[in-house]
Image: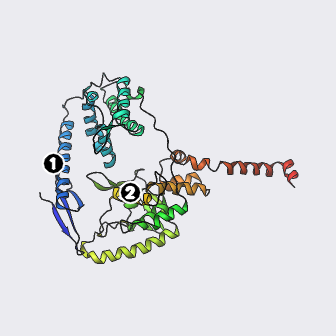
């Protein structure tokens, strides 16, 4: 089916494609992807997406056959693992990342029978990836993979072997006794209030970026959670976070948050509420400008002028450019605003349980691990408070002080 053109009252033109996936049955939703700048971009993207859908259908057809071949090699095991588990149960971004990581494995290892793969074979593979597992985009020359990436690849292989044990194909997981690298733990960067305000004031790019950054700074919510917020999620000075906007190379869709089945109310600072009120007035001007073409059904707080979702990766890229322009410390990104929010609250004396709940962490242990530097930073205050407590509650010392 040919791609389609959409023209708005403002004169702006965008392209999109839509088609039914291979093997679709009654009730299967049509795949629609919007926002291409040219017809050629839309056609190229449609061709790639159709090829991926056809491959996914073929793998699923093979995998759903009860009498299909039993995985013998690591390559066969990974394909079965993706069909039966990854592609069925995980989030789109996670699925894309798993496929990319599995593609890094050497062909020789993938051809090996799973019963013959030892921890030594895997340790050799981790070392190969560390030395030359990647490539430069322009020259395609080999380059090292980071320890974090190699450990993530090992995690995918380990999950596949764990599934093989559950299926009764093998008895032990060789990854458990291999030696994947341990990445060096990096201390998170937190902005000062002056740096944070400078980022917001200098925001450029998407029309709503400044307000978006203010909400990021004032709530500590994740990028996708804020981009998925609707005006109906705003009530009594709080936003109710129930979903997230995720982006892959082929998909832009709404899904549940990292802590599935949870509804997280987050109170807004008064300054953020005021900023959102002004933002809504500007957005209403776009609503009037686009008229019936405006995507009022999505009800998004942060959106393109015509009401369609912003692309998370594009927003992050715009913020990274902004941070470099302001000459902020290396490593500062959009996520730094979330990290700064938690650090500022802990520095202000907020209980770690409240910070953990506000940020939507799965446990207090996660919060303590991520913000250990902020907790250690209050050690001097803890020592002084202990000393004061001893003086107040020891009669001899209290008398001496008087």
Residue occupying the point 31% across, 75% down: 287
Colouring mode (rainbow / by chain / secondary structure / one colour)? rainbow
User: Which numbered dot is residue 22?
Assistant: 1
- Tally of numbered discs: 2
Q: Quadrant of residue 315?
A: bottom left
Secondary structure beneath label 2: helix
CA separation, marks 2 and 1? 33 Å
| Residue 367 position in % (x across, y down) | 52, 48
Left or right: 323 as drawn, with respect to 250: right
The quarter of the picture where the N terminus appears is bottom left
Residue occupying the point 48% across, 73% down: 274
Residue lying at the far top of the rendered structure? 116
Left or right: 84 as drawn, with respect to 370: left
| Residue 51 position in % (x across, y down) | 17, 47
Residue 376 can be seen, yes or no:
yes
Whichever of callouts 2 and 1 sits on the residue coming sooner in the sequence is 1
Q: Which of marks 2 and 1 is in front?
A: 2
Q: Name the residue under label 2.
A: 316
In the rendered view, tell whether residue 372 sits above or below residue 162: below
């Amino acid at each position: 089916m040919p791609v389609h053109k959409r023209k708005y009252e403002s004169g702006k033109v965008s392209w999109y494609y839509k088609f039914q996936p291979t093997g679709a049955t009654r009730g299967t939703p049509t795949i629609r992807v919007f926002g291409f700048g040219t017809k050629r971009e839309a056609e190229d993207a449609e061709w790639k997406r159709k090829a991926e859908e056809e491959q996914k259908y073929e793998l699923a057809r093979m995998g759903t056959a009860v009498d299909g071949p039993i995985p013998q090699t690591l390559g066969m095991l990974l394909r079965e693992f993706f069909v039966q588990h990854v592609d069925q149960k995980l989030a789109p971004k996670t699925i894309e990342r798993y496929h990319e990581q599995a593609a890094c494995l050497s062909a020789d290892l993938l051809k090996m029978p799973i019963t013959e793969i030892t921890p030594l074979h895997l340790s050799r593979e981790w070392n190969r990836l560390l030395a030359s597992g990647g490539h430069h985009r322009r020259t395609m020359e080999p380059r090292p993979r980071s320890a974090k990436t190699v450990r993530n690849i090992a995690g995918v292989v380990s999950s596949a072997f764990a599934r093989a044990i559950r299926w009764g194909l093998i008895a032990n997981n060789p990854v458990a006794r291999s030696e994947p690298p341990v990445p060096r733990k990096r201390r998170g960067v937190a902005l000062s209030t002056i740096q944070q305000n400078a980022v917001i004031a200098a925001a450029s790019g998407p029309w709503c970026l400044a307000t978006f950054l203010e909400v990021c700074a004032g709530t500590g919510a994740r990028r996708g959670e804020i981009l998925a917020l609707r005006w109906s999620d705003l009530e009594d000075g709080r936003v109710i976070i129930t979903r997230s906007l995720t982006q892959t190379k082929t998909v832009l869709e709404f899904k549940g948050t990292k802590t599935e089945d949870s509804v997280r109310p987050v109170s807004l600072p008064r300054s953020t509420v005021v900023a959102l009120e002004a933002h809504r007035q500007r957005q209403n001007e776009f609503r009037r400008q686009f008229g019936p073409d405006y995507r009022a059904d999505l009800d998004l707080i942060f959106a393109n002028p015509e009401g369609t979702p912003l692309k998370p990766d594009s927003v992050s890229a715009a913020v990274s450019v902004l941070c470099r322009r302001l000459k902020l410390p290396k490593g500062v990104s959009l996520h730094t605003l979330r990290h700064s929010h938690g650090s500022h609250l802990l520095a202000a004396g907020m209980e770690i349980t409240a910070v953990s709940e506000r940020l939507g962490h799965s446990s207090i242990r996660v919060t303590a691990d991520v913000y250990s530097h902020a907790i250690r930073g209050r050690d001097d205050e803890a020592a002084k408070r202990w000393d004061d407590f001893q003086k107040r509650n020891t009669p001899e010392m209290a008398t001496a002080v008087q």
